[in-house]
Image (cartoon, grey):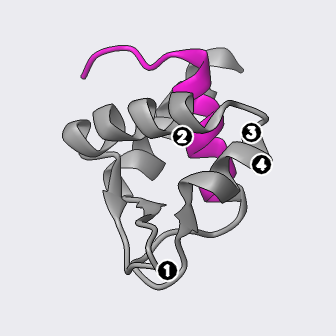
């Protein structure tokens, strides 16, 4: 798997920290943007890549917005990154 950027890691960290690990417990792009202090459009573009890589996936819709959660693959990749750092 290719290296994740700092912003992508922040998104994963936010989803893991808030236990967004299934279709029901998922955050909208706006909520992730507020949590990570990244712009809405940055989060939207990065999530497209994370979904393609399989570390995040789309959850249930919240009104007119998609929601996103971290997959098991995403959790294991995040843990692997943490082990490399520490």
Question: Viewed as shown, does residue 2 lie left or right of 62?
Answer: left
First to last magenta residue range:
1-16
Between 18 and 43, the one nearer to me in the picture: 43
> Which residue carries the number 2 mark?
79
* Separation of marks 4 and 3 at Cα, in angstroms: 4 Å
Identity of the residue drawn at 74% across and 39% down: 36
Which comes sooner in the sequence, label 2 or label 3?
A: 3
Distance between the Cα atoms at labels 2 and 4?
Answer: 20 Å
Give the Cα distance between marks 2 and 1. Answer: 29 Å
* Residue name at image x 59 percent, y 40 percent: 11
Q: Is residue 19 above or below residue 61?
A: above
The quadrant the C terminus occupies is top right
Instruction: Using a 10 Å C-alpha cutoff, classify the residue at mark 3 as few (fewer than 14 neighbours), some (14 to 19) or many (20 or more).
Output: some
Q: How many marks?
A: 4
Helix or strand or loop: what does disc 2 sit on? helix
Dot 1, crowdedness within 10 Å: few (<14), some or many (≥20)?
A: few
C-alpha distance separating marks 1 and 3: 20 Å
CB-based contact (under 8 Å), mark 1 and mark 3: no
Label 1 or label 3, whichever comes before in sequence order = 3
Task: Determine which residue is flagged by label 4.
Answer: 35
List the residue tagged with mark 3. 36
Please tell me whether residue 61 is drawn above or below residue 6 in the rendered image. Answer: below
Q: Kindly identify the residue that appears in the image at 33 percent across and 64 percent down.
A: 58
In which quadrant of the rendered image does the N terminus lie?
Answer: top left
Q: Nearer the viewer, mark 2 or mark 4?
A: 4
Label whose residue precedes the other's in the sequence (2 or 1): 1
Most extreme residue toward the front, as rendered? 64
**Left or right: 74 as drawn, with respect to 11:** left
Q: Give yes or no for contact between labels 4 and 3 (Cβ–Cβ under 8 Å).
A: yes
The kind of secondary structure element at disc 1 is loop
């Amino acid at each position: 798997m290719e290296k994740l950027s700092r912003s992508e890691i922040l998104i994963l960290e936010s989803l893991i920290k808030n236990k967004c690990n299934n279709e029901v417990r998922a955050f909208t792009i706006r909520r992730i943007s507020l949590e990570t202090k990244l712009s809405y459009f940055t989060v939207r573009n990065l999530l497209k890549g994370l979904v393609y890589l399989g570390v995040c996936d789309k959850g249930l819709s919240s009104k007119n917005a998609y929601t996103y959660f971290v997959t098991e693959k995403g959790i294991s990749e995040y843990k692997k990154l943490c082990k490399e750092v520490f």
